[in-house]
């Protein structure tokens, strides 16, 4: 009898210390246990094959015992969750949130601190987070490191950005995991902000493909009051470790229990389309905290912006961003873009072509003094230049039924922006601006903070919440990359947070594969304001001495309106360039920006992507197909169309001699009648694409 009790006791301990949970379909399994030293360890299998080998979990605390070993299990519980929810703006009308959950309650033998590890397993991947309940043993605490590991099984192909704590505006590298090395790549991100923390550090999301054909993606969700997670690669053993962005004195996060960490996520599939189509990151965020969302609306806009990038005009009134006459009476250079007259021209164009809004950059004083000076106070966000009449422009836009979009460039001076924020938002309400684009170019002030640190994450989220208080929409640029917070605050309609179109005007640009990678990485966390729609591809059009160009064909620029999701989309080129190609411009006028349904038809990271979407509240469908530097042919089934309904398909495609380098503007347009039984052949030029609109025939 004594021997039997001993066996039962050991069996109970074994069951308690080793737990597992599966995805609803049973394809993915997470196994959890405590190691011999009481360290939390997890592993992940996909279809009974190891994907993540046993990997450590835990948190290191400053001036307190670490929470990554010497644990014992207090309890465990499982749960199943299945719901559908409707995003305010999105890629589909309804999103399914279905997962199985395992919660492991731990207590430190040394400090008696309690910590829970929560696993959620979806059909498309795994998420886990650290949860610190209210307790006497742990109140206010400082995180110095995370022990989280991702020990992979193979030398995967990876699509990676260098782990810069201050910028995500780099082109992607496509190498094997063993070849990650920041010292061997071009570290010029084009804006002079670099803070590379290590030779083998990379950013998340990290997209991978294993030699056996499995697609993996490591990312995070719901980053709130916490720094961004980067990954340190052990390139020899295929191991990745979480690296948190520090603040000015090296601390990672200041927390107070009860609190939680962000979710660490691992997406897994043998079909690349599942990664692009995943809504797991959104599902891991809290539901909307805005009760009345009627004022949150999609927008298609034009703006005074690209003309500054190509050198036609300037942001600053005096014509030199490093002018020495700041603080004295400014004299106009005659090249200022944000004038009353020029803005009215954009308003007229928007009204004529059915656009919702006009963005104006360079409207407020301060641009002469901020570039590279790292000053505390440059902009006040309320004082226009002498040639920009706020009242007259607002009245003119209102008469034309066009909304104005405000621009707030902070120059990285966060404290200055927060001090002026309410006055800036009051001004927006006074002149009926529904949305603003913010910018954070340059080093962050307070000095020593990083764009991806806890302080800045809190700032970006605070601005979204404050905008919501005023019933205003936010589109942030140069921010930390989104992790699904737009579900919680859907007025945070878009962000840049990656290398956008602007780099093509004055740097080596974005290679043709760039847009085929972003939907597998940056766009998993939320909409991106990529600013597509450039028709004059080569910058030599503006200056014969320039060699820069957009690495694309014109047809691909149209396709990006479908493949690069954002509910606030810009037609970024100069108005006169659209007037030269009115037949191609018609697609930009027609394409929707808010959707009832989305289907990923073809996908391979770094190579190609084909997506079709159904317009919100309509029967119209739009398709976008893009490729990298290689020309491609494929056949698309139109079985997504409504059965029994005929559609007029207008196909905007590369001409036979089109090529992103040699002949980028060559395109053709043809119209055919199709049904859901039809097929369409796609012929994509090198660096090219195809855009199609499907309108039901009444």
Image (spheres, helix red, strand yellow):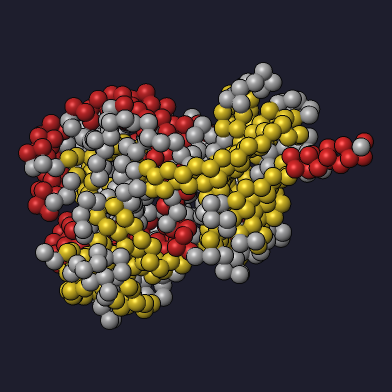
Is residue 202 toward the left or the right of residue 549 in the image?
Answer: right
Q: Is residue 375 above or below residue 567?
A: above
Is residue 507 toward the left or the right of residue 235 in the image?
Answer: left
Say which residue appears at 44% left-offset and 31% top-offset. 459
Task: State the residue in front, 559 or 191.
Answer: 559
Determine if residue 464 is in view: yes
**Quadrant of the rendered structure where residue 143 is?**
top right
Say which residue appears at 68% left-offset and 42% top-offset. 57
Q: Is residue 574 above or below residue 253?
A: below
Q: Is residue 42 above or below residue 622?
A: above
* Position in image of residue 476 (x %, y %): 36, 41
Is residue 239 toward the left or the right of residue 245 in the image?
Answer: right
Q: Please, which residue is most extreme toward the bottom here?
A: 656
Task: State the residue in front, 447 or 289.
Answer: 289
* Position in image of residue 371 (x %, y %): 38, 41
Determine if residue 450 is in view: no
Say which residue appears at 16% left-offset and 36% top-offset. 388
Say which residue appears at 71% left-offset and 60% top-offset. 236
């Amino acid at each position: 009898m004594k021997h039997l009790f001993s066996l039962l006791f050991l069996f109970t301990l074994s069951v308690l210390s080793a737990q597992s949970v599966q995805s609803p379909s049973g394809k993915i399994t997470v196994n959890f246990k405590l190691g011999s030293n009481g360290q939390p360890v997890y592993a992940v299998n996909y279809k009974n094959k190891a994907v993540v080998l046993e990997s450590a979990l835990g948190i290191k605390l400053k001036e307190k015992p670490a929470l990554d070993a010497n644990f014992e299990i207090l309890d465990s519980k499982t749960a199943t969750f299945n719901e559908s929810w409707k995003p305010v703006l999105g890629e589909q009308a309804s999103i399914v949130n279905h997962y199985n959950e395992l919660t492991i309650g731990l207590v430190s033998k040394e400090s008696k601190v309690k910590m829970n590890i929560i696993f959620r397993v979806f059909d498309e991947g795994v998420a886990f987070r650290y949860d610190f309940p209210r307790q006497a043993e742990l109140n206010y605490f400082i995180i110095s490191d995370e022990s989280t590991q991702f020990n992979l099984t193979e030398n995967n192909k990876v699509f990676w950005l260098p782990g810069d704590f201050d910028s995500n505006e780099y082109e992607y590298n496509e190498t094997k995991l063993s070849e990650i090395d920041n010292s061997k790549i071009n570290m010029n991100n084009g804006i002079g902000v670099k803070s590379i923390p290590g030779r083998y550090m990379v950013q998340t999301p990290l997209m991978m493909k294993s030699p056996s054909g499995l697609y993996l993606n490591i990312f995070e969700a719901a980053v709130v009051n916490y720094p961004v997670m980067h990954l340190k690669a052990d390139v020899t053993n295929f191991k990745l470790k979480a690296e948190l962005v520090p603040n000015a004195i090296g601390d990672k996060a200041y927390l107070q229990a009860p609190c939680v960490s962000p979710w660490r996520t691992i997406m897994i599939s043998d079909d690349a389309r599942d990664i692009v189509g995943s809504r797991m990151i959104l599902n891991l965020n809290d539901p909307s905290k805005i009760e009345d969302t009627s004022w949150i609306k999609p927008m298609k806009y034009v703006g005074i912006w690209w003309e500054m990038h190509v050198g036609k005009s300037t942001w600053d009134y005096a014509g030199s961003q490093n002018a020495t006459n700041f603080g004295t009476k400014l004299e106009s250079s005659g090249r200022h873009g944000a004038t009353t007259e020029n803005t009215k021209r954009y308003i007229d164009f928007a009204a004529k072509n059915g656009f919702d809004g006009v963005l104006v950059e360079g409207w407020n004083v301060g641009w002469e003094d901020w570039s590279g000076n790292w000053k505390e106070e440059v902009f006040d966000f309320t004082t226009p230049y002498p040639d920009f009449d706020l009242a007259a422009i607002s009245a003119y836009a209102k008469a034309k039924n066009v909304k104005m979009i405000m621009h707030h460039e902070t120059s990285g001076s966060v404290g200055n922006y927060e001090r002026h924020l309410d006055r800036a938002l009051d001004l927006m309400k006074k002149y009926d601006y529904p949305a603003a684009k913010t910018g954070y170019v340059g080093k962050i002030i307070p000095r020593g903070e990083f764009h991806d640190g806890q302080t800045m994450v809190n700032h970006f989220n605070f601005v979204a919440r404050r905008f919501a208080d005023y019933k205003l929409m936010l589109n942030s640029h140069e921010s930390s990359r989104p992790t699904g917070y737009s579900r919680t605050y859907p007025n945070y309609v878009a962000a840049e947070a990656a290398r956008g179109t602007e780099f093509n005007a004055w740097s080596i640009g974005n290679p043709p594969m760039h847009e085929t990678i972003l939907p597998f990485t940056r766009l998993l966390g939320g909409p991106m304001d990529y600013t597509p729609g450039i028709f004059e591809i080569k910058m030599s059009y503006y200056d014969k001495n320039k060699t820069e160009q957009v690495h694309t064909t014109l047809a691909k620029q149209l396709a990006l309106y479908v493949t690069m999701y954002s509910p606030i989309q810009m037609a970024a080129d100069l108005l006169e360039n659209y007037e030269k190609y009115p037949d191609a411009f018609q697609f930009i006028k027609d394409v929707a920006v808010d959707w009832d349904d989305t289907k990923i038809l073809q996908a391979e990271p770094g190579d190609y992507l084909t997506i079709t979407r159904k317009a919100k509240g309509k029967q119209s469908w739009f398709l976008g197909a893009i490729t990298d530097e290689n020309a491609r042919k494929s056949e698309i089934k139109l079985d997504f169309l409504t059965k029994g309904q005929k559609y007029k398909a207008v196909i905007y495609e590369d001409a036979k001699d089109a090529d992103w380098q040699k002949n980028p503007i060559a395109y053709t347009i043809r119209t055919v009648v199709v049904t859901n039984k039809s097929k369409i052949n796609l012929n994509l030029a090198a660096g090219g694409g195809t855009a199609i609109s499907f309108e039901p025939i009444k």
